Image: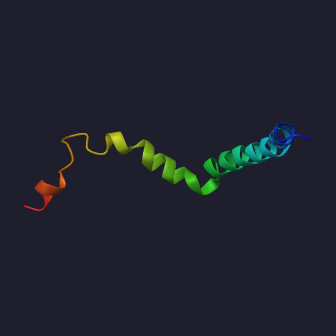
């Protein structure tokens, strides 16, 4: 068996399986029950300082 055929066989079976498991793990991690608050907080970032822009670090230290 030449090297190309061996690598192709490994890529077609084991790498595909690893990528599917990685994808499913990522989906489960993103939709886990404890992440709702984190996602809600991240979604609200653009609306935190509606009245005025946030103070920069230089303005806050003066």
- In this rendered view, identify the residue nearer to me: 28 or 23: 23
| Image-quadrant location for residue 17 | top right
Q: Residue furthest right?
A: 1
* x 50%, y 47%: residue: 39
In this picture the colour scheme is: rainbow
In this image, 45 relative to 35: left or right?
Answer: left
* x 92%, y 41%: residue: 1
Q: Residue furthest bottom?
A: 61
In this image, 38 relative to 18: left or right?
Answer: left
Residue 41: % across, % down? 43, 49
Residue 11: % across, % down? 80, 40
- In this rendered view, identify the residue nearer to me: 31 or 23: 23
Q: Residue furthest left?
A: 62
- In this rendered view, identify the residue nearer to me: 48 or 10: 10
* x 64%, y 47%: residue: 31
In this image, 34 relative to 17: left or right?
Answer: left
* x 11%, y 54%: residue: 59
Q: Residue furthest front?
A: 2
| Image-quadrant location for residue 4 | top right
In this image, 56 relative to 34: left or right?
Answer: left
Quadrant occupied by the C terminus = bottom left
Residue 27: % across, % down? 67, 45
């Amino acid at each position: 068996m030449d090297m190309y055929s061996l690598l192709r066989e490994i890529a077609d079976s084991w790498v595909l399986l690893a990528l599917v498991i990685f994808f499913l793990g990522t989906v489960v991690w993103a939709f886990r029950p404890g992440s709702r608050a984190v996602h809600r907080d991240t979604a609200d970032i653009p609306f935190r300082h509606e009245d005025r822009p946030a103070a920069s670090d230089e303005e806050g230290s003066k």
